[in-house]
Image: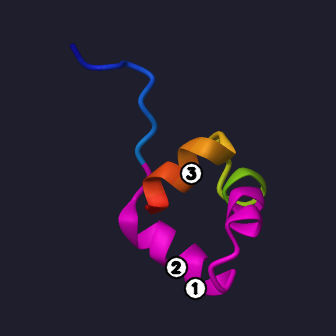
Amino acid sequence: MTRKDKIEIDTELLHRIYNECDGWRERMHEKLKEEEGIKIGYSTLTRILR
């Protein structure tokens, strides 16, 4: 069974934002929300980045 609400973020977008934020996950979380309109929990983002 697959979750319907599973968040998938383009890996190129994550790489770009990671580099722009010098790896600061808190700032990445802010940019994804404010600039890209992606609503994602901080814990979900950190899990994706691992």
The residue indicated by pointer 1 is 19
- Asked if residue 22 lies in the magenta stretch, the reply is yes
- Asked if residue 24 lies in the magenta stretch, the reply is yes
User: Is the residue marked by circle 3 packed among few (<14), some (14-19), or many (20+) residues within 10 Å?
Assistant: some
Query: Sequence-wise, which precedes: disc 3 or disc 2?
Result: 2
Quadrant of the frame with the N terminus: top left
Looking at the image, is 26 positioned above or below residue 42? below
Compare residues 40 and 13 and report the one nearer the observer.
40
Q: Locate residue 41, reporting x and y percent.
A: 65, 40
Query: Sequence-wise, which precedes: disc 1 or disc 3?
Result: 1
Query: Which stretch appears magenta?
Result: 9-31
Q: For the residue labelled by badge 1, is the local secondary structure a helix, a strand or a loop?
A: helix
* Residue contact at pointers 3 and 2, CB within 8 angstroms: no
Q: In this view, does 11 lie to the left or right of 20?
A: left
Residue 38 visible here: no
Amino acid type, residue under disc 3 in the picture = Leu
